[in-house]
Image (cartoon, grey):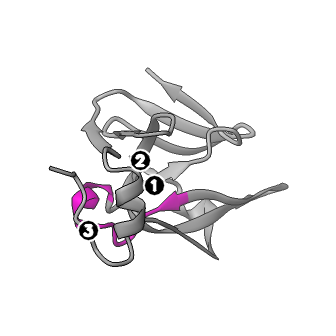
């Protein structure tokens, strides 16, 4: 049985990749995210997302993210497995990183556990996992 329900919009992709998986694992590791020396997230309750064809990604609970350093952007992307992603840019002092952070505000039911969590581009941030 496939992990994802088939809808008309998702059917073609699901047929091309029938074994696609998005695994959500709770973690008790301490994860901090910095950008150019500025701490922007720190948590002991991250989620580790293991997704077919992607590197593992830590998602941080929104309450553990410095939202005061972020501003919402108009960018929105669509993943047929997770839903629509919204983006935020980091703006603090002389640092401006466009669309550095994303979140699924209303994820597909199969990955509803992502709701309320944010992820950071690993090539533009420093992630420390202890």
Mark 1 in CB contact with mark 3 (< 8 angstroms): no
**Residue found farthest to the left:** 1
What residue is at 25 percent from the left and 58 percent from the top?
4
| Residue 125 left/right relative to 127 | right
35 w.r.t. 110: above or below: above
**Residue found farthest to the top:** 130
Q: Position of residue 7 (x, y in %)?
A: 28, 74
Q: CA distance from mark 1 to mark 2?
A: 5 Å
Residue 118 image label = 1
Q: Return the residue at label 3.
A: 6
SS at mark 3 in the image: loop
Task: Depth check: give the residue in front, 74 or 16.
Answer: 16
Q: Is residue 109 magenta?
A: yes
Mark 2 in CB contact with mark 3 (< 8 angstroms): no
**Sequence-wise first label, 1 or 2:** 2
Q: Return the residue at label 2.
A: 60
70 w.r.t. 126: above or below: below
Q: Is residue 30 magenta?
A: no
| Foreground label between 1 and 3 | 3
65 w.r.t. 68: above or below: above
Task: Depth check: give the residue in front, 60 or 69.
Answer: 60
**Sequence-wise first label, 2 or 3:** 3
Span highlighted in magenta in the image: 102-114
- Which of the image's four quarters has the C terminus? top left
User: For mark 2, does the 10 Å Cα neighbourhood hold few (<14), some (14 to 19), or many (20 or more) residues?
Assistant: many
Q: Position of residue 89 (x, y in %)?
A: 67, 63
User: For mark 1, does the 10 Å Cα neighbourhood hold few (<14), some (14 to 19), or many (20 or more) residues?
Assistant: many
């Amino acid at each position: 049985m496939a992990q994802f329900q088939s809808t008309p919009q998702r059917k073609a992709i699901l047929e091309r990749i029938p074994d696609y998986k998005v695994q959500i694992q709770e973690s008790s590791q301490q994860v901090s995210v910095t950008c150019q020396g500025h701490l922007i997230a720190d948590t002991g309750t991250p989620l580790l997302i293991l997704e077919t064809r992607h590197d593992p990604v830590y998602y941080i609970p929104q309450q553990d993210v410095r939202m005061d350093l972020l501003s919402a952007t108009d960018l929105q992307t669509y993943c047929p497995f997770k839903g629509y992603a919204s983006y935020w840019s980091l703006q603090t002092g002389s640092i401006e990183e466009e669309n550095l952070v994303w979140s699924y505000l209303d994820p597909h039911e199969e990955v509803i556990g992502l709701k309320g969590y944010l992820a950071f581009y690993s090539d533009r941030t420093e992630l420390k996992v202890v």
